[in-house]
Amino acid sequence: MEYSFAPIPRKAENPSVDPLSLARKLLEAGPICDYCLGRRFAGLPGKLSNLERGSLLRGALGFSNTPPENCWVCGGVFLRVPSWAKKARDLSQEHEFKTFLFGVHLSPRLEATEEFLAERFPSPWAEPIRRHLNRTLGQAFAELLREEGREVTVDYAHPNVQFLVDIEQDEVQLQVNPVVFYGRYRKLVRGIAQTAWTCPRCRGKGCEVCGGTGKLAANSVEELVLPVFLEATGGNGGSFHGAGREDADARMLGRGRPFLLTVEWPRRRTVDLAWVAEEVRRRSQGAVELLDLQPATPELEEKVKAGKFAKRYWAKITFLAPVSEEAFQRAVAGIRGEILQRTPERVSHRRADLVRRRRVFSAHGRLLSPTEAELVLTCEAGLYVKELVSGDQGRTKPSLSELLGVPAQVTALDVLEILDNTSVEVPDSEG
Ligand SMILES: [Zn+2]
Ligand SMILES: [Zn+2]
């Protein structure tokens, strides 16, 4: 290819450095390739590549061409770019991705040359060789895939796949980054935990506490959902993260609870989410349903991880002694408003022992018999409903038991709705 000489500005940010005399010094110091010569001037205005810039300067100064393999700076490292790009293509062939990023592990020799160049031939326009290599690799790789009809682009923040080129070892390593899905789950039967509930006594080996199963709940949403996602994506592992959790014995109804499902090392990122939802429903025999499945966005991930939402509950309650309708309604009115709740006894092993101030936004109930009632409550995030009813031996105040003067206990609990949508009205309080 021929280049006509384009004028290079003699004065730049640093008036003490003149590009042409710096280029001459570099060319006189030893055999240097156009990639490495041009890289010392990468920051000069213009749209030329380093290779083009190097060639131009060499021509302008009347120096003859240097084969890159003789270059004292890089030893011809840029000639190896196409083979690394091919290796990266081969490594990643079985994985679906749209974005990628290259990184290089420089050899000690290249590191030393970089330092030497900066010391002996300082240039205000120089680009680090690492960045030059990363970019050249990325361009070669994208071009290779384009020839195969695949469009991929560099993503510096959240690439689907990453390649690390070890120059000394002449090795390319692939890292497939996880794919994350967002959804909402409904749990239509009781006795399903949210995540696998390993028996704390035997730690999964099986003992008399867990009946030899190693688990305290026979099944979990995670165990029902994750394998289907792994099948759909071809991933090799993953995790389930709910926006909070309900007890295993509570159903999760309404529009379900938001969750994130992360799949490690996926082969496919574009999956048939309707198939996933249907398969989960079928395999769980209707016990678990997934709604709203979609690829997670940073906003959705943040929402699930923050996970603090008001909720509406339904609770069935049993009283130790008969209560009157009037006394019951008075007690229900009494639990509306602010509740002081010390960390419940049953969770104190995994939560800090604190007194929390939580609001009951609304509470309505009716007696089913003198010793049974049902209650519908709308509560602030983090309020424990079972303890609001039982009083938890005085740790929750006020409580339905305390107000009635009769011990009361939740015998069945459902989450009717997670109020995470701002369009859902949460009444402040009612009298
Ligand atoms: Zn070179
Ligand atoms: Zn056990």
Image (cartoon, helix red, strand yellow):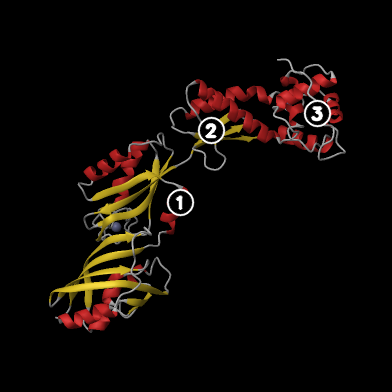
Query: What residue is pinned by disc 2?
Result: 153
The image quadrant where one finds the C terminus is bottom left
CB-based contact (under 8 Å), mark 1 and mark 2? no
Q: Residue at x 86, y 33 (%)?
A: 18
Where disc 2 sits, the SS reads: strand
Tell me the kind of residue under disc 2. Thr
Q: Residue at x 72, y 23 (%)?
A: 52
Q: Residue 80's x, y, as percent?
A: 63, 23
Return the residue nearer the eye: 170 or 145.
145
Res 60 quadrant in image: top right
Read off the residue under disc 1.
Answer: 299
- First along the sequence among labels 2 and 3: 3
- Ranked by sequence position, the earlier of labels 1 and 3 is 3
Q: Nearer the viewer, mark 1 or mark 3?
A: 3
Vertically, is 8 above or below 285? above
Q: Quadrant of the N terminus?
A: top right
Few, some or many C-alpha atoms within 10 Å of disc 2 (few <14, some 14-19, many ≥20)?
some
Q: Eyeballing the image, is 99 above or below 1? A: below
- Name the residue beneath numbered marker 3: 8
